[in-house]
Amino acid sequence: MQINNQHLLFSYQNFITRLDEVKEYINHVLLIANMSLPTLLDLNSPSLSQESISRDLQKTLRASTYLLLYNLMESSMSEAINAIHETIKDEQRDILDLSEKLHRVILTSFQRGLTESKIGEYAKMNHDIRNNLLDLGYDKQRLFSGNIDCVVIDDYCKRYGFQAYVYREDGTTPLQWDPDIIKNIKKKRNALAHGSQSFAECGQNIVIDTIHNNLENVYAVLMAVFNGLNYFLENKRYLRTLPQQTQTNNLP
């Protein structure tokens, strides 16, 4: 994917790095699953001691893929959305320059951040709040808070005014995803994170093929988000009035 916006490129590169980490973990889980008697061998031990990888440990390893995949989704989405905010700040845009949807996003965040203590602070210091319009109340770490799925992704796309465009990896083959699979990843992650299901319970019924399929679906939906955001930022769709040269650019 050719990305010219430096902030989106930074987010995309972080996504690829995390993706590679998740792939490496999943590859090891799949490798262990295909062994008849998976065993750890300590090459530094004089006796070359061995330790078998128990069935319960394998269940835990499989269940942990839900945590890794969900983390990949939430962190990548947070940084992708943040690229819009960083672009606006970097270009020193006035709020009046922004599209109606971005205008609403900024004002909603500002309203949330304008607490009684902030009002008192600004009044006492005679602070010009215009300097904080783009930042107050916005925190990329609190965008999703454990609830991201395709419904939430679609909601953020609409809120900011961009679309997630299906990405064609080799120029022809579209990367498709199943919203139910993404929703199930969120559901399983939350069950593990909140302790309502143990790792062994979660992992005991996971079919090996499911793990790789989950990864492919997460990859597809995130690539679609980056694809849509790339078009959105490249064509300055965050502005209320589009520059003339960007009005006829083709969709990705």
Image (spheres, helix red, strand yellow):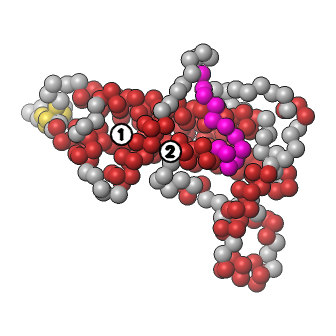
Q: Nearer the viewer, residue 103 or 30?
A: 103
Q: Is residue 79 visible?
A: no
Residue 149 numbered mark, or none: 2
**Quarter the C terminus occupies:** top right
What main secondary structure does the magenta stretch of the protein show? loop
Determine which quarter of the picture holds residue 6: top right
Q: Residue at x 26, y 41 (%)?
A: 203
Q: Amino acid at mark 1?
A: Thr
Task: Tell me the mark number nearer the camera, choosing from 2 and 1.
Answer: 2
Horizontal and vertical percent for residue 1? 63, 26
Residue drawn at x 14%, y 35% is: 52
Instruction: Estimate the x, y position of residue 235 in percent, counting from the top left.
Output: 79, 35
The magenta stretch is 157-168
Viewer-side residue, 131 vs 133: 133
Name the side, left or right, on which 220 lies relative to 207: right
Where residue 122 appears, as percent x and y from the top left, is 75, 78
Kindly identify the residue that appears in the image at 55 percent across and 39 percent down. Answer: 14
- Is residue 152 among the parts visible in the rendering? yes
Q: Does 165 lie within the magenta span?
A: yes
- Seen as rendered, the residue at the extreme right is 244
- Label 1: few (<14), some (14–19) or many (≥20) C-alpha neighbours in 10 Å: many
Q: Secondary structure at mark 2?
A: loop
- Residue picked out by circle 1: 65
Residue 32 is situated, as x and y percent measured from the top left of the image, at: 24, 29
Asked whether 39 or 237 is in front, the reply is 237
Q: What residue is shown at x 9% (from left), y 33% (from top)? A: 47
Looking at the rendering, which quadrant does residue 163 occupy? top right
* Mark linked to residue 191: none
